[in-house]
Image (spheres, rainbow, N blue to C red):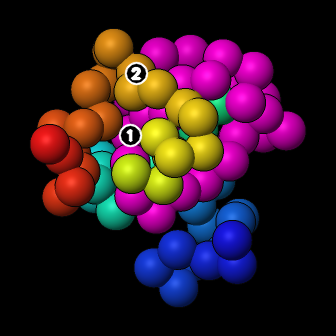
């Protein structure tokens, strides 16, 4: 993945660290060590940067084998929610 919304990895990571709710539903954060994906504003403990992958949609994260976080409920923020 080169970018999401025209934003580079550094900008996406800043949104993750600041838990910026303006990005909810626009991209998702997957954590390789747990197999979970979250909204950018998720209040759960922040994962290490080396364990983070960014996805444009929740559908992409699920196809990659991640499951939705039970804390932030990312499917609620997704336009692809079933």
Residue 55 image position (x, y, % from top left): 53, 56
Q: Which residue is mark 2?
A: 69
Q: In the rendered image, which residue does mark 1 sit on?
A: 39
Is residue 72 visible to us here? yes
Q: Position of residue 66 (x, y in %)?
A: 55, 32
Mark 1 vs mark 2: in front: 2
In the orientation shown, which residue stands out farthest toward the bottom? 6
Q: Height in image: 12 above or below 8?
A: above
Q: Which residues are magenta?
A: 32-58
**Element carrying mark 2:** loop
Residue 58's x, y, as percent?
Answer: 38, 48
- Contact between marks 1 and 2 (CB within 8 A): the answer is yes
Q: Which mark is residue 13?
A: none
Residue shown at the point (66%, 17%) measured from the top left: 34
**Tag 1's secondary structure?**
loop
Identify which residue, 39 or 58, lies in the foreground.
58
Q: Judge whether residue 19 can be spotted in this image.
A: no
Left or right placement of residue 19 versus residue 8 in this view: left
10 Å neighbourhood of mark 2: few (<14), some, or many (≥20)? some
Residue at position x 39%, y 51% in the image: 59
Residue 56 in the figure: left or right of residue 76: right
Question: Mark 1 and mark 2: span between their CA atoms?
Answer: 8 Å
Question: Could you tell me residue 75's position as x and y percent?
Answer: 24, 38
Which residue is at a point 58% across and 61% down the rendered structure image?
12
């Amino acid at each position: 993945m080169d970018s999401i919304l025209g934003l580079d990895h550094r900008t996406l990571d800043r949104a993750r660290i600041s838990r910026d709710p303006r990005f909810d539903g626009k991209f998702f954060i997957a954590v390789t060590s747990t197999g979970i994906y979250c909204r950018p504003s998720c209040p759960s403990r922040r994962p290490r940067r080396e364990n983070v992958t960014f996805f444009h949609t929740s559908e992409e994260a699920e196809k990659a084998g991640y499951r939705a976080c039970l804390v932030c409920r990312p499917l609620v923020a997704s336009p692809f929610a079933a």
